[in-house]
Image (cartoon, grey):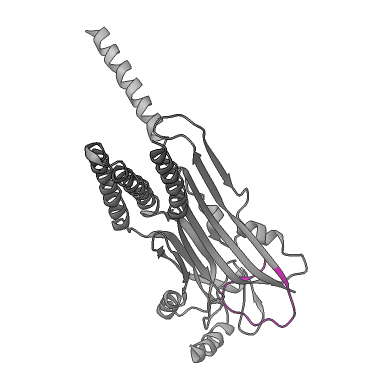
């Protein structure tokens, strides 16, 4: 009787671990931080509203995003080559933008933000591009 | 026999060319945000530039309200869509109910991107083109062969073409749009001291 219980427990443990493995194979996490407009950590104003500027400034711009390219040259089970190319920015656009602000700059005007996505499909090929681009001007 | 081989070669070339021409589907969803046209300052950091051009830091104000709202920017599948993101109406509504001086630490975060039916629709349309063109080619071959044997080939081609049409129609019916899922959040602040009331009155006259 005790042996049967142990066997049942082992089977349950194997099934639970199997389900955990399957659950972990879901779609990849959406990297929110790469698509966030934020002035967190900036010790100067990062203006999103139109602000009158007295002096000339210098342009700042940055981008971050993800890229996926899947290709499969095989068809109808005849074999072939398939590959997946996945790329992701190391740093968010907001962080890159802040890095371009000089010590002498007093504030930044955000002039244009663009959320861009493109999904391309053709025979045996799939491409997906997601990108956040930020453009602004840093003023003294 | 030589005539049949020529037809087969020609059909293969036609299939290759048509498949290349008809087999590309792209969905582009672009959302842009320009400088916000508001009567009050909106900053992404904890500091902001006030209407007089002075820099206001965290020491000069208190947060009176935190807000967040959701926006979805949709686009039709297999088309290029450009949307200008207008956040001003939502922000105006929040500011009018709170009577604040400015918005700080505003954050626009894409929490997800939904591809809608883009890939499923493209897959079915591509299958539609493949089966349709192959079917029509087989029908042409059947007509070329003629006799009873050709009749069977024609029927097979018609079935292929029918599957192609059905697949394409099904692909065209799938139209769930793609969308950027955006979360907008921030703090409404009120300036400390007597400058606060004067600023609000000045801002109120321009609102």
Q: Is residue B206 magenta?
A: no
The count of marks equals 0
Quarter of image, res A44: bottom right
Q: Residue at x 44, y 42 (%)?
A: B9
Residue B176 against residue B91 in the figure, above or below: above
Overall secondary structure of the magenta stretch?
loop
Q: Residue at x 36, y 54 (%)?
A: B117
Residue A127 against residue A113 in the figure, above or below: above
Residue A49: image x %, image y %? Answer: 56, 76
Region rendered in magenta: A42-59
Residue A113: image x %, image y %? Answer: 56, 67
Q: Residue at x 30, y 18 (%)?
A: A11
Residue A16 against residue A135 in the figure, above or below: above
Q: Is residue A54 magenta?
A: yes
Quarter of image, res A131: bottom right
Residue A92: image x %, image y %? Answer: 60, 54
Residue B135: image x %, image y %? Answer: 31, 45
């Amino acid at each position: 009787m005790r042996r049967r219980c142990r066997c049942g427990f082992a089977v349950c443990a194997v099934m639970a671990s199997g389900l955990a493995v399957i659950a972990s194979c879901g779609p990849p996490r959406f990297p929110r931080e790469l698509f966030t407009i934020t002035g967190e950590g900036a010790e100067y104003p990062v203006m999103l509203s139109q602000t009158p500027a007295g002096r000339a400034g210098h342009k700042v711009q940055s981008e971050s995003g993800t890229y996926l390219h899947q290709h499969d040259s095989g068809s109808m089970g005849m074999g072939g080559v398939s590959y997946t190319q996945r790329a992701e920015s190391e740093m968010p656009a907001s962080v890159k933008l802040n890095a371009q602000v000089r010590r002498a700059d007093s504030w930044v005007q955000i002039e244009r933000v663009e959320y861009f996505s493109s999904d391309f499909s053709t025979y045996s090929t799939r491409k997906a591009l997601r990108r956040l681009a930020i453009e602004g001007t840093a003023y003294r | 026999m030589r005539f049949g081989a020529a037809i087969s070669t020609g059909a293969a070339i036609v299939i290759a060319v048509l498949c290349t021409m008809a087999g590309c589907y792209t969905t582009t969803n672009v959302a842009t945000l320009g400088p916000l046209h508001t009567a009050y300052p909106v900053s992404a950091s904890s500091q902001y530039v006030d209407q007089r051009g002075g820099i206001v830091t965290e020491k000069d104000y208190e947060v009176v309200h935190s807000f967040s709202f959701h926006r979805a920017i949709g686009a039709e599948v297999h088309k290029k869509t450009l949307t200008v993101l207008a956040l001003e109406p939502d922000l105006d509504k929040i500011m009018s109910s709170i009577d604040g001086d400015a918005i700080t630490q505003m954050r626009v975060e894409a929490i997800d991107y939904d591809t809608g039916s883009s890939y499923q629709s493209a897959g079915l349309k591509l299958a539609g083109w493949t089966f349709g063109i192959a079917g029509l080619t087989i029908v042409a071959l059947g007509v070329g062969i003629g006799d009873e044997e050709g009749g069977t080939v024609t029927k097979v081609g018609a079935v292929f073409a029918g599957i192609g049409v059905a697949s394409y129609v099904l692909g065209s019916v799938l139209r769930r749009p793609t969308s950027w899922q955006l979360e907008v959040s921030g703090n409404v602040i009120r300036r400390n001291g007597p400058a606060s009331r004067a600023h609000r009155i000045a801002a109120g006259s321009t609102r």
